[in-house]
Image: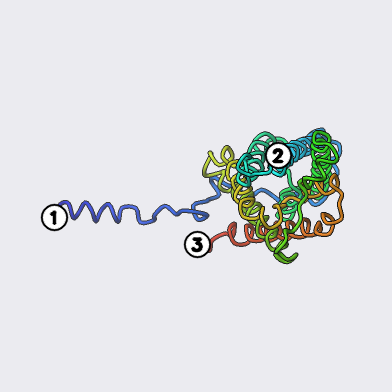
Amino acid sequence: MEGKEEDVKLGANKFSERQPIGTSAQTDKDYKEPPPAPLFEPGELKSWSFYRAGIAEFMATFLFLYITVLTVMGVSKSNTKCSTVGIQGIAWAFGGMIFALVYCTAGISGGHINPAVTFGLLLARKLSLTRAIFYMVMQCLGAICGAGVVKGFEGSKNYEMLGGGANVVAHGYTKGDGLGAEIVGTFVLVYTVFSATDAKRNARDSHVPILAPLPIGFAVFLVHLATIPITGTGINPARSLGAAIIFNKDHAWDDHWIFWVGPFIGAALAAVYHQIVIRAIPFKSTRA
């Protein structure tokens, strides 16, 4: 027994420093903080990769609106929701498309597909202002085209009768309720984007980049489950703008500001939280 006790003591004391976990586990050996992106980078405007990324954002947002608004139309068209995919199906359409499109475009443009995501990453200095503005413009154009194609399939009369997939604050809720839902919903999404694409985690866990689209898509799915009854779930200004322009009815424009202000506030809060709290370098003592 004495021998075993000595073995236990030796095992407990042999390695005095335990392996740290979380952010404390990072060292200069496996990770170096990349420099912040410049605010303006004129050289980007002469690069084909810059325009290729914008085209990828356009196409991804176009496909996103096409599939998701068509799904909304299908549910709205039916007299009984039991014969359709229902609210859960709409949520899966949004989340599933984000999963697929982020997977397809992450290596080209970063797979933003959302001006709020682009805005959050801009605040964190992950891309230049030039690229951010270009992405937002292309995302909005893609969304308008996607919703326009859906209207072409459904026909103007049918499209307008079914609401056009436009985001509005539902009856029984105030504009403040809608704004709060958009802020929190976008915070969940952008916070997930930051966590899933964190370069510090990538340095330690090689599987993180491969799995990144999954939690992002799942976050979109969950937010839609929670907030479809309140606002139809925007959390993406391009998605809301595209549907509003093609639908073009007064009650959609009355609430439209909510679907820009809310997501941008939520994205800003997520960026601040991730950069200051989650990514904060832990305090540790240094030995001479």
Q: Residue at x 62, y 45 (%)?
A: 216
Q: Residue at x 42, y 52 (%)?
A: 19
Residue designated by label 1: 2
Q: CA distance from mark 2 to mark 3?
A: 62 Å
Which of the two labelled residues, at mark 1 and mark 2, occupies the earlier sequence position? 1
Viewer-side label of 1, 2: 2
Q: Amino acid at mark 2?
A: Gly
Q: Secondary structure at mark 2?
A: helix
- Tell me where residue 167 appears, x and y as whole percent: 76, 52
- Tell me where residue 86 appears, x and y as whole percent: 63, 44
Q: Amino acid at mark 1?
A: Glu
Q: In the image, which disc is placed on residue 85?
A: none
Q: Quadrant of residue 159?
A: top right
Residue designated by label 2: 74
Which of the two labelled residues, at mark 3 and mark 1, occupies the earlier sequence position? 1
Q: Quadrant of residue 82?
A: top right
Q: Nearer the viewer, residue 200 or 246?
A: 246
Q: Which residue in the rendered view is the most extreme toward the front?
A: 79
Q: CA distance from mark 1 to mark 2?
A: 75 Å
User: Neighbour class for label 2 at 10 Å: few (<14), some, many (≥20)?
Assistant: some
Q: In the image, which disc is placed on residue 286?
A: 3
